[in-house]
Amino acid sequence: MNITILYFARIKEVVNYSSEQVSLPDEVETIIALKSWLSNRGETWQKLFSGSGVVRAAINHELVDDMATFDEGDEVAFFPPVTGG
């Protein structure tokens, strides 16, 4: 499955780019599985996506939880939680 991943704010600064096209293995169908898959890229990725910090997700501009599924061609965005004031 091919999707576009967008990175925002602190995440974008840490990974050093704002988007990428990825081809995922068949078993990566949920946000939590995608975070796990990304965390296997190395220590920096593991710190971002292994669960030690909160990373919010959106699919096609709609906020979702970690159990949400995505489809071929979807756009998945990751960003840190936003605080208001």
Image (spheres, rainbow, N blue to C red):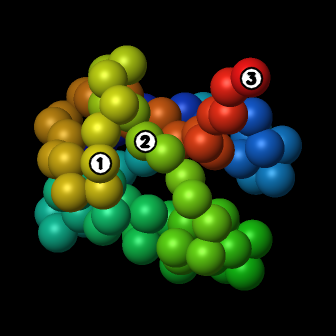
Q: CA distance from mark 3 to mark 2?
A: 21 Å
Q: Which residue is mark 3?
A: 85
Disc 3 vs disc 2: which is toward the camera?
Answer: 3
Q: CA distance from mark 2 to mark 1?
A: 7 Å
Q: CA distance from mark 1 to mark 3?
A: 24 Å
Q: Which mark is residue 65?
A: 1
For numbered disc 3, what is the local secondary structure? loop
Q: Position of residue 60 (x, y in %)?
A: 32, 22
Q: Quadrant of the C terminus?
A: top right
Q: Position of residue 33 (x, y in %)?
A: 30, 67
Going from N to C along the chain, the mark reached first, 1 or 3, is: 1
Q: Is residue 42 left or right of residue 75?
A: right
Going from N to C along the chain, the mark reached first, 3 or 2, is: 2
Q: Identity of the amino acid at label 3?
A: Gly
**Could you classify mark 3 by the number of other residues whose Cα lies within 10 Å: few (under 14), some (14-19), or many (20 or more)?**
few
Q: Identity of the amino acid at label 1?
A: Asp
Q: Is residue 23 visible?
A: yes
Q: Residue at x 49, y 45 (%)?
A: 56
In the rendered image, the vertical position of residue 78 relative to residue 6, given as above or below: below
Q: Of 41 and 47, which appears nearest the observer? A: 47
Q: Position of residue 55 (x, y in %)?
A: 55, 53
Going from N to C along the chain, the mark reached first, 2 or 1, is: 2
Q: Residue at x 17, y 69 (%)?
A: 27
For numbered disc 1, what is the local secondary structure? loop
Q: Identity of the amino acid at label 2?
A: Ala
Q: Which residue is mark 2?
A: 57
In the rendered image, the vertical position of residue 37 relative to residue 56, given as above or below: below
